[in-house]
Amino acid sequence: MELLPQATVDGLLIGGIYITIAIGFSLAYGVMHIIDFAVGEWIMLGAFLGYYLNLWSVLDPFILLPAIFLVFAVIGYLIQPLVYRVISGKKGNPVLMGLVFTFGLALMFRGAALTGFGFYSHSIPSAISQDSFFIEMGSVFITIPYVRLAGLLYAIAITLVLHFVLKKTDFGRAVRALSQHREASGLMGINAKRISSYVYGIYVGLSAMTGVIIGSIFTLNAQMGGEYTILAFFIVVLAGMGYLAGVPWAAFLLGLVQSFFLIYLNPSYTLMAVFGILFTILLISPKGLFGRGV
Amino acid sequence: MSRKYLLLILSFGALLAVPSVIHDTFFLRIITEAILWIGLAISWDVLAGYTGYLNFGHGAFFGIGAYTTALLMKLCGWSFFLALPFAGLAAGALAVIAGIPTLRLKGAYFAIATWALSRAIQQVALVMDITGGPDGMRLPTFLHPDFFYYLMLGVVAAIFALYWFLLEKAPFGLKVKAIREDDQSAMSLGLNPTWIKLQAFILSAVPTGILGAIYAYWITYIDPASVLGDLVTDQAVVMAVFGGLGTLIGPAIGAIIIYLFKTYFWAYLSDYQVLYLIILGGVIAASVVFLPNGLWGTISGYLQTRNAVKQKPVPQEKIDKGVHHV
Amino acid sequence: MKGRTKVLALLLVLAMSVPVWADEARDFFKVGVITSLSGSLATGGNVTKRGYDLWADAVNAAGGIEIQGKKYPVKLFYGDDQSEPAQGASAAERLATQEKVDFVLGPYASGLTLAAAPVLEKFKIPMITGSAESPMIWKEKFRYTFGTIPPVNYTGSAPINTIAGLNPKPKTALILGSNDTFSKATAEAFQDAAVKAGIKVLKFNIVPSGQDLIPYLSAAKAMQPDLIAFGGHDEELIKLVKALNQINYTPKALLMHYGVTEPAFIEALQKSADQVFGASVWTESIKTKGEVLWPDAKSYADAAMKAYNVPADYTQAGSSAAGIAFQMALIKINGVPPLDEKKRDELVDALEKLKVNTFYGEIGFATEGQFYHANVGLTPLTIQIQNGKVVVVGPDSLAESKPLYPMKAKK
């Protein structure tokens, strides 16, 4: 039995989910230099909004995505000035201050979710979560679940949209200017505060949509945030912090590592391998896979 | 400044007398654990506050110390005091092995690399048979409250004194601070930043391993979740930041306040348990917004300005000209 | 400086002037509850709390525990272990020294029990846990620690034996477990039983908790295992069923453990939960005869539903049963509050000899061997989800319905 195609496909599918977890986060880091500990909690809150909207409207979670994005983009836009104040303070260590501040936010969100939504795990049903493509050619066969393929396509779509926005629009040029030269961009008439607010809104909205995807592929519960926060950190660091183009490659790499360990090697060592490889890559290339991080 | 340390010595003396005054072993246990957290917060701060490197894998040193002790006592039948130095050694060895490559990394990369390393170590403990995997390990039971109180107090006081001497009195402290402020110019002064940073890393790791050893013997049960999880690091970071980075007293104060809040909340207000995370999170977030230098940093900053104003009044004409700005 | 010294002195005096609770005479029992009300295990911890509360409320509604003609109510004192062993030990110390509890109802998880037990051992305070059940606890042979839920290596073989007896008999199995104490022990119990029942184990693996298993399962699909057995917690079980749906593989039988009886499992999976096998020791429909408080499982389930508006599960039932075990043992030894050290020792002896029928089933603690002080009075059940309901399908003597087998594909 030839398992290589299956292992590769599964690795890419997992990688797709990882892209959605990390891409908004990487964007926010590039512009604001904030390491947001609450990224997993945004994912969790988005998942719950998706869960309740789905219960109420019976619409497929994938159709609900734009609504979720809007709600959370507004929340992110409104909360950004507070975050900005913390990380632009002259005193202390701004990176650490941002980390600790968002850690506090994450605890508050988790506590509020436990109070409001309870402890139990839920699932967001989707019409496409029950079946898969099955391809068989001689001894080679591949199973591709519909819902995971949808997740990967979604990940590729938002990556391309972000790429287009950053390269081709005025807003995108302003964002790139801001992430390269904060002071100089101010001289060029770019309103750093306004742009940062938009970026933070986009990041929170993207993370919330990721929650809905995760809720329909896996499960959601009030305590799910922590694990996704770690994943987001690891992928973004592997990609090079703030280097958006590196995110898909880092995500696919981690996905493939997991898939190959689960299929070919000892599944018990999967996570150990993931952390070990991340650590090793950082030692070899201290600014991420491509040495392009900031 | 000497008054501050007189106060410290006085409170140490008071702490020595605690077991003879308080016979309630629960309170003794609480104070013992508060002292443990003081040790963990200051040992994290040695690297973070003094050299600027945020170690998010601090818990790994604690866990290594705990597991080393458990393994030596259980498998080799060693006594606790024989195993104790090896717990420190193991943590120190990890600091050397991990420190040489990771200390080249900057800012967030260092934080995440150390975090990844601690996660990998947790996975190792989870999959090995010798460590009991997810079941963890039980140690020989020796539940003597006074013994653990004095041991913890003695060890943490020694750590505090060592740090204070090395960082505040000896030239080492100046070197470390020079590197935190500017790597390059420190190098041009003939300092070897990598070596000094590594020394600080070891200085942070060894005591943490020893504290892990005491914890293991005291609680009698360890598992990968409790001693190798994120909890130890998270709490030490929050305590140090809340109290004030880059000092020894700040993290100690932060440890006492946060630990006591946590303990009293759970012991006597557990009816309001749903609010706990919300309150704790709110306090942490608010303290960063309103006390960016931490509690102690803010207080001592305030005292210094007051003293400075007292000692050297600003001439009226300077204020009129707008030259003086605080 | 002087002002600061004064403040410090005041603080020290305050810290030291801790009131000392005297061991005064009282006409009620002080019952400590150590469990996870917060932290990562809070879900399960709150289930045990509901079980302990329900027992206390029922006892007090009847006026208390009747001993030599007088009724003594019970009062619960909570100690949250915050899902951390150190805090579990600390909670035990507080309940022992400050509240001076007569006995303790124990933690949800095994690690917490292992941390609290030595402290209670020191103070000679008996504890019964209504939930923790790792084989590791019983190996330690704590004199003062008991448990109402049988260890997983005692319950895990029942469903495998039931499934092995079905037609056509499953020939091959894929067995995996999540890497935590309970799940790993479950998977190992499944494996042992499968080998004994003559089912060939194609693959046995312990996987990291929370791991996405799609690659593993799509590779395993090629081997077409008849039985997939998985040890894990509710969230992981939901993920596994969803993953199997996604890759469109239906084994002849899908087996998990307790987790499938949790309401969240059926709620989250809806129809996909159907025909999944599980193991349990209690469901609200089993036939039991209770000598005290609740006459049968149904009446307990109704009382629980009325009190909390959440269906009772085996953990909650086991927790309430832990209270009953203490209650019956106290009556045996004529123990009136406060219990002194000698009386508490008698209580332990009485618990060792105890044989009582409850709504939960028979409680009888083993006094030797690998199950020392675990409840071995119960019959392990094989259960299955049928039309969204938990139904007992084995052993034959207790079955309410025939197992649905082989599993129907979802489409």
Image (cartoon, coloured by chain):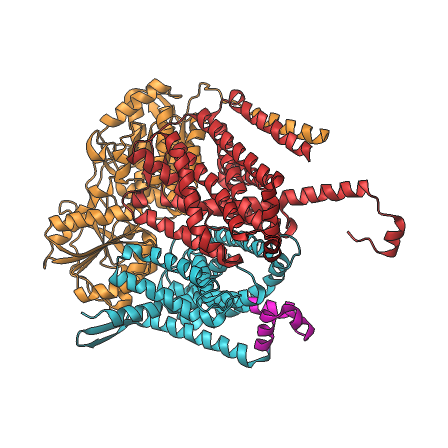
Please state if A160 lies on the left or on the right of B224 as rendered: right
Vertical relation: A157 (above or below) C139: below
Q: Main secondary structure of the magenta part?
A: helix
Tell me the quadrant of the picture where the N terminus of chain B can be found: top right
Q: Estimate the x, y position of residue B208 in percent, counting from the top left.
A: 46, 40
- Residue B258 visible to an observer of this rendering: yes
Residue extending furthest toward the right:
B317
Displayed quadrant of residue B312? top right
The picture's colour for chain A is cyan
Let me know if residue A56 appears in the view: no
Q: State yes or no: residue A142 in magenta.
A: no
Q: Which residues are magenta?
A: A171-200
Q: Position of residue A289 (x, y in %)?
A: 43, 67
Nearest the eye: C384 or C132: C132
Q: Residue at x 29, y 59 (%)?
A: C240
Chain corresponding to orange in the figure: C
Picture quadrant of residue B321: bottom right
In the picture provided, is C203 more to the left or to the right than B13? left
What residue sits 17% from the left and 64% below the top?
C223
Q: Is residue C217 left or right of residue C53?
A: left
Query: Looking at the image, which residue sits at the far front?
Result: B190
